[in-house]
């Protein structure tokens, strides 16, 4: 594991449609941190596969996760804390992200599959079709007790989710900058 950095990367994780973008945006605004979308790091080949309804495998995800890890390290070395979205479905994926030279923490948005399916069915303009949701739930390994993070029920309203996450991670309150 890299040397401990004074910087933090807060990764909002979960399957497609759980509200990662909304939650990350609110967290970044509340904390005053830079925000990024993991989807922006996908190579075109991954986007093409998902657009065609083909689930990504570990070999597809590894370079993507490494690019995100390297971005976290770059931001930490520039003195920035960040909030980003990333499905981070498997522990091994989260392990790659934790290789970054920053304190990588997770906010796992979790809820029942029917609620997520309803949400993803209502969204438009995203390259991942609803048909891939079952593959994501199949790959999902929930955040474990020894991982630095918190699990939050996605059925709460976005403001409540953010408040719960910040409180559980001890990032709430005036003057918090780490």
Image: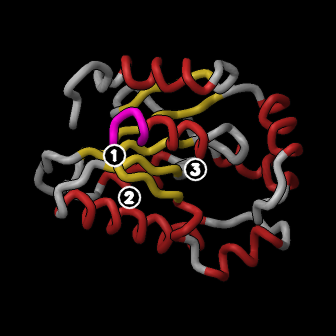
Instruction: State how far apart marks 3 and 1 are (Cα).
Output: 20 Å
Query: How dense is the environment of label 3, judged by Cα within 10 Å: few (below 14), some, or many (20 and up)?
Result: many
Instruction: State how far apart marks 2 and 1 are (Cα).
Output: 22 Å
Q: Are marks 2 and 1 in contact (CB under 8 Å)?
A: no
Give percent across and percent down for residue 165: 44, 24
- How many callouts does the rendering have? 3
- Which is nearer the eye, 33 or 7? 33
Q: Are marks 2 and 3 in contact (CB under 8 Å)?
A: no
According to the picture, the residue beneath numbered tag 2 turns out to be: 96
Mark 2 or 1, closer to the camera? 1
Instruction: State how far apart marks 2 and 3 are (Cα).
Output: 13 Å
Quadrant location, the C terminus: top left
Residue at position x 80%, y 70% in the image = 51
According to the picture, the residue beneath numbered tag 3 turns out to be: 87
User: Toward which corner of the image does residue 29 lie, by quadrant?
Assistant: top left
Question: Does residue 48 appear left or right of residue 13 in this picture?
Answer: right
Give percent across and percent down for residue 169: 33, 25
Give percent across and percent down for residue 56: 68, 66
- Which is nearer the eye, 135 or 156? 156
Whether 118 is drawn above or below 163: the answer is: below
Instruction: Please give the range of residues in magenta.
Output: 28-32
Quadrant location, the N terminus: bottom left
User: Toward which corner of the image does residue 46 lie, by quadrant?
Assistant: bottom right
Q: Secondary structure at mark 2?
A: helix
Query: How dense is the environment of label 2, judged by Cα within 10 Å: few (below 14), some, or many (20 and up)?
Result: some
Looking at marks 2 and 1 on the same chain, the residue that comes earlier in the sequence is marked by 1
Residue at position x 47%, y 74% in the image = 63
């Amino acid at each position: 594991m890299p040397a401990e950095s004074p910087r933090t990367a807060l990764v909002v994780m979960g399957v497609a449609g759980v509200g990662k973008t909304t939650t990350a945006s609110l967290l970044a605004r509340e904390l005053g941190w830079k925000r990024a979308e993991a989807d922006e790091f996908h190579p075109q080949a991954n986007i093409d596969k998902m657009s065609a309804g083909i689930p990504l495998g570990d070999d597809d995800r590894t370079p993507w996760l490494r690019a995100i890890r390297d971005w976290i390290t770059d931001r930490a070395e520039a003195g920035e804390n960040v909030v980003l979205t990333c499905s981070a479905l498997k522990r091994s994926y989260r392990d790659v992200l934790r290789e970054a030279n920053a304190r990588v923490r997770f906010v796992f948005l979790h809820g029942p599959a029917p609620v997520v399916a309803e949400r993803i069915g209502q969204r438009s303009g995203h390259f991942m079709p609803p048909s891939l949701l079952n593959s994501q739930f199949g790959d999902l390994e929930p955040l474990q007790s020894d991982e630095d993070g918190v699990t939050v029920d996605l059925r709460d309203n976005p403001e409540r989710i953010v408040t719960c996450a910040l409180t559980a991670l001890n990032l709430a309150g005036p003057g918090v900058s780490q």
